[in-house]
Amino acid sequence: MLTDELRRIADAAVRYAAPGEELSAVIPAEPLGGEFVFLCAFSDGDANTWVALDGSGAPVLERRLVRDAVAIAAMCELAEETAGGGNLPELRARLAALREREDAHGLEEAEAAAADLEAALAPGVRVASPAYLDRLGAAARRLEQALGEIASSPFAEAMKQAGVTVDALAADIERHYKLELT
């Protein structure tokens, strides 16, 4: 079970905490290749430091693997935040209100697509992976099309713009990585 795995990794990660730091997050990621990487954030109240652990709890020292884990974790987070216009419950409420006020053609399709997107958004703890990102993207696109966005995809545009943010985050994590990366 993922929560047990996170607990085990958190127990392994605490040995990397410097005096005054606390483990503040364990982010499970599965970048391309299927290898699990757990991004572990530590905070002293002012700044964060990081270490990535593999599935056995050993530190990840390969720069490329750390960057790939950061990238997929950040892209999944952004996808969750932007899918459905950034506020899926509000969108679903507006669709329901429309249904009560008028007979809007195609409303059923939009409501079904919104429900599918909500189902695709993994509740609670989830693993950031390309497969999860693909599921979110497909569900978001279906909803956009049901809402009349045929030519362009606001979701895809947001994901394209994320590259700069993801690169900056990865560089920041590298600068504040607790171990030397190769």
Image (cartoon, rainbow, N blue to C red):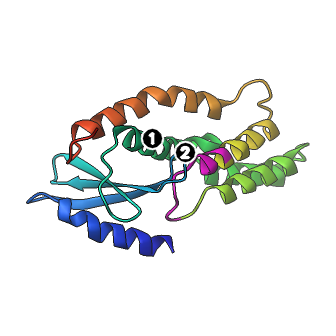
Q: Amino acid at mark 1?
A: Asp
Q: Residues within 10 Å of mark 1 (few under 14, many from 20)?
A: some
Image x and y of residue 116, in percent: 74, 55
Q: Is residue 5 above or below residue 24?
A: below
Magenta-drawn stretch contains 4: no
| Residue matched to label 2 | 32
Looking at the picture, which amino acid does disc 2 mark? Leu
Q: How many numbered circles does the render carry? A: 2
Q: Secondary structure at mark 2?
A: loop
Which residue is depicted at the point 49% across and 43% down?
72
Seen in the image, is 156 located left or right of residue 162? Answer: right
Residue 180 seen in render: yes
Asked where in the image residue 106 lies, by quadrant, the reply is top right
| Closer-to-camera residue (153/135) | 135
Residue positioned 83% across, 52% down in the render: 99
Residue located beneath label 1 in the image: 68
The disc at residue 123 is none
Residue at the location (46% across, 56% down)?
36
Left or right: residue 108 compared with residue 70 = right
Figure quadrant of the C terminus: top left
Residue at image point 90% right, 47% down: 103
Picture coordinates of residue 25 (x, y %)? 33, 58
Height in image: 130 above or below 25? above
Q: Residues within 10 Å of mark 2 (few under 14, many from 20)?
A: some
Circles 2, 1 touching at the beta carbon (< 8 Å): yes
> Which element type, helix, strand or loop, lies under badge 1?
helix
Left/right placement of residue 75 relative to residue 179 reads right
N-terminal of the two: label 2 or label 1?
2
The magenta segment is 124-134
Give the x, y percent position of residue 96.
76, 55
